[in-house]
Image (cartoon, helix red, strand yellow):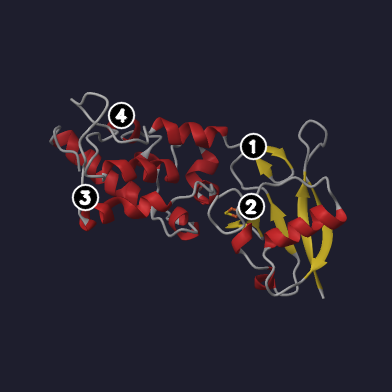
Amino acid sequence: RTIRLEVARYRPGEDAEPVFEGYDVPLMSDWAVLDGLNYIKDQLDGSLSYRWSCRMGVCGSCGMTVNGEPRLTCGTFLTEYGDGPVRIEPLKGFPVIRDLVVDIDDFLAKLSSVRPWLIREGEELPLTTEYAQTPAQLEAYKQYSMCINCLLCYSACPVYVLDPDFLGPAAIALAQRYNLDSRDMGDRFDVLNLEDAVWGCTFVGECTRVCPKHVDPAEAIQRYKLTAALRSVLPWSKR
Ligand code: FES
């Protein structure tokens, strides 16, 4: 028994526009969409380009659009799609480099822009102090630290797809991962309190719905709106 995969093929600069090529791959009960792509690459067409690494939902590199939905292809089983076909495209909202590979430079720049490290003041290096945390203090930011940078939330976000300058769900959730850490002394107000940051979010919530790690970027964004509003009244307020 086989299932048909319709895979987007595109070489910018060489092809006028993307086309779909059909491949029949074995329909195995334990095969993920990524296994189907690997079968194509190994057995049918070695020129197919896509990213993957861990095959266990950890590295975040295998995100693609599967039948219109942003999904991790290593965690999406072929049997979810009955007799098929299964249409596989690159993640929406990102420039295509080749076939299913997208350019993530803009995403990486956005992650860096929120200063994703513990901001401390008045300390000399090297640090010699330990900063213990209670379980409750860890719990305050733990969910945001589970992000694997898979880009699914950006691909699902209607604001980012229309406005590439929007800071976006994962970067804002990452900022909150540090803002809510009891060891951090910053609030990243300068990069978050902007029209193209938290105030650009229309709270559709698609980012949260598609996250394979159950991070809740929509909650992070709404929560920071309250923080930003409070800070404009009480400038010394961090949270
Ligand atoms: Fe690493 Fe899918 S291959 S998350």
Which quarter of the rendered image does ligand 1 occupy?
bottom right
Kind of residue sitting beneath label 3: Gln
Kind of residue sitting beneath label 2: Met
Give me the C-alpha separation between circle 3 and circle 1: 41 Å
Give me the C-alpha separation between circle 2 and circle 1: 13 Å
Tell whether label 1 touches label 3 (CB within 8 Å).
no
State the residue position of label 4.
Answer: 190
State the residue position of label 2.
Answer: 64
The residue lying at 51 percent from left, 35 percent from top is: 108
Q: Earlier in the sequence, mark 3 or mark 2?
A: 2
* Residue 121, position as x, y percentages in the image: 21, 27
Residue 205 picture quarter = bottom left
Packing grade of label 2 (10 A; few <14, some 14-19, many >=20) is many
- Assign a secondary structure to mark 2: strand
State the residue position of label 3.
Answer: 133
State the residue position of label 1.
Answer: 95
- Assign a secondary structure to mark 3: loop
Q: Earlier in the sequence, mark 3 or mark 4?
A: 3
Quick check: can you spot residue 203?
no
